[in-house]
Each structure stands twice: as structure tokens, then as C-alpha cells.
Amino acid sequence: MMRKTRFLAVFLMAVLTACAGAGHLSNWHDESMDFGAVKTVAVMPFANLTQLQQAGGRVRDTFMSMLMATGGVYVLPPGEVARGIARAGIADPTAPSSEEVVKLCGIVKADAVITGVVKEYGEVRAGATFGNIIALDMSMLEGQSGRVVWTASAEEGGVSMKDRLLGPSGKPINDITVQALNEIINKLFK
């Protein structure tokens, strides 16, 4: 009986661990917002909660390129956004207030502002096994009112059960970053 209980406990732990390595995406849209009216966006510097200092900048640059490549909106260049932030006097560009968003959008002529938070980025270990992970949250704030009209979260990568059993075979950080950002962009204007 003890052997069956131990086997069942190990089996359940394995299943839960395997589920933890799967991707995750959540999404919310303001139903009253006309996303078709958004033609120009300013992407703010992303907050970085990781130990890798460049994570926020890397993810922001990749996101801006991918969003521009969709052809759905014009993404203001980072230098223009930085000048607008300075002219608007925004103290923390990673978390602007509603008033600051309205002021910035008036200065740079943007319809909306996108903010982001990189929560995890890089290598993660589980015992002797490792893999790459990214977890991030993003929001869109409407330029005329400064209210949040869209949010999304994504998490990709990690250590899967296959990695634990057969050795590390995780995807490169660039691949999982693109995968997570693709999921977010696909949900942005739907």
C-alpha cells in the first residue's frame, strides 16, 4: 500500500511539473474602445523586474519591431518617445499616470501608449535541469483619456517534464521571446 501511495505522489508531482512548463496567456479588452482608431502608438520603456539589466530594453525593442511589422499601427521611434517623455516631464516612464499619458500623446501625436513589465527573462533551473523563460505583462492606455483599454500577460518557456527526463533541450531565449510577443500581438487588436 505504501508503495502505491508513493508512486501516486510521484506521478502527480510529475504531471504538475509538466503543466508548469506550458505557455500561458491572459487578455482583456475594453469593450467600449474602438481599436481601429488607433493608428500611432508610443511604446514606453518596459519595467524590468529581472536580474538581467538589459531584459526590458531587449523585449521592448523586439516588441516594437514585431508590432511595426504587422502594418496595423505606426510605432513611434524610441528617440521620439524619449524626447516626448522628457518634454512631458514624466518621472517614471515605465508607469505613467493617466494625466502623463494624455500629455505625452498630445506632444508626440500618438493615439495610445503601450507599457510593459518584464517579470522573468533568461535561464531558470529546476534541480540539475535548466531552460529559458520569459514572463511579461503589457497594457495599452488610450491617448485622449489615459485610461487602460487593453492588458495581456504571457509566459513562455521554462523547464518541461521532457527536459527533466531527457536532459535540457529548452528553446533559446530569443525564440521564446518572439513566441510570447507573437501571442500578445495576436490578441492586441482582436
Image (cartoon, rainbow, N blue to C red):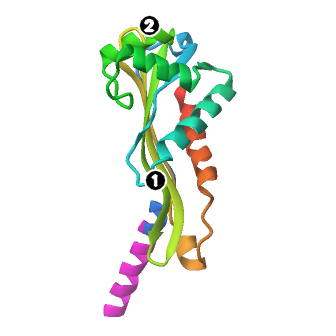
List x then y, in percent, for residue 187. Answer: 54, 32
Q: Residue at x 62, y 51 (%)?
A: 174
Q: CA distance from mark 2 to mark 1?
A: 33 Å
The location of residue 182, given as percent across then percent down, is 60, 39
- What kind of element bears circle 2? helix
Is 167 left, or right, of 1 in this rendering?
right
Mark 2: which amino acid? Gly
Badge 1 marks a residue whose secondary structure is loop
In the rendered structure, the answer to whether residue 60 lies left or right of residue 119 reads right
Residue 146 position within the rendered picture, expressed as x and y whole percent measured from the top left: 36, 15
* Helix, strand or loop for the magenta stretch, by majority: helix
Q: Which residue is mark 1?
A: 52
Q: Quadrant of residue 180?
A: top right
Question: What is the quadrant of the C terminus in the image?
Answer: top right
Using the rendered image of the protein, determine whether residue 31 is visible from the camera's viewpoint.
no
Residue 5 vs 136, above or below: the answer is below
Residue 176 belongs to magenta span: no
Q: What residue did someone put label 2 on? A: 106
Q: Nearer the viewer, residue 20 or 98?
A: 98
Given residues 100 and 37, the one toward you in this image is 100
Give 59 or 28, whichever is nearer the viewer. 59
Residue in the picture at 36% in, 92% down: 3
Quadrant for the N terminus in the image: bottom left
10 Å crowding of disc 2: few (<14), some (14-19), many (20+): some
With respect to residue 25, does 185 lie above or below? above
Residue range of the region highlighted in magenta in the rendering: 1-16
- Type of residue at label 1? Leu
In this view of the protein, can residue 140 be seen by the observer? yes
In the image, residue 155 lies at what x, y percent? 48, 49
